[in-house]
Image (tube, grey):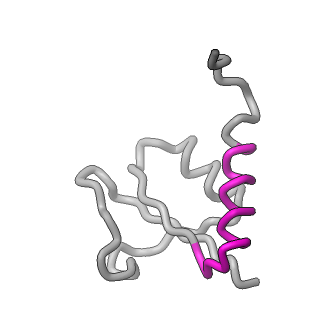
Amino acid sequence: MIRPWRPGDGQALMDCLLAQARLRGLDDITVGTIAKFDGALGFYAKNGYVQIPRNALRFGFPVMAPDDIFCRLDLTS
């Protein structure tokens, strides 16, 4: 049975993602979103992501049609 979503679940998932990314030796994580999702933008910023221009995306990054904001987290520091 799946329990309902609760406050803190998103942060728990992010913490797990970051731990796994570091274990795998990734240098960074990049995400795309849309400007009207200001809650998502705040969440990413709280977790250290910074906005980057679209032209800074790596070749082949899978951009979804509505994405207009991109954020990257540097895992090397």
Q: Residue at x 55, y 46 (%)?
A: 40
Q: Residue at x 50, y 68 (%)?
A: 30
Q: Residue at x 74, y 43 (%)?
A: 12
Relative to 1, 62 lies left or right: left
Q: Nearer the viewer, residue 36 or 33?
A: 33
Measured as percent of width and height from the top left, residue 10 is found at 67, 40
| Quadrant where the C terminus is found in the figure | bottom right
Does the segment drawn in magenta span residue 66?
no
> Relative to 54, is 2 above or below?
above
Q: Residue at the left extreme?
A: 65
Q: Nearer the viewer, residue 44 or 13?
A: 13
Q: Residue at x 59, y 69 (%)?
A: 50
Q: Which residues are magenta?
A: 11-28
Look at the magenta stretch and give its main secondary structure.
helix
Measured as percent of width and height from the top left, residue 52 is found at 47, 74
Q: Residue at the front extreme?
A: 1
Q: Nearer the viewer, residue 50 or 65?
A: 65
| Quadrant where the N terminus is found in the figure | top right
> Relative to 70, is 66 above or below?
above
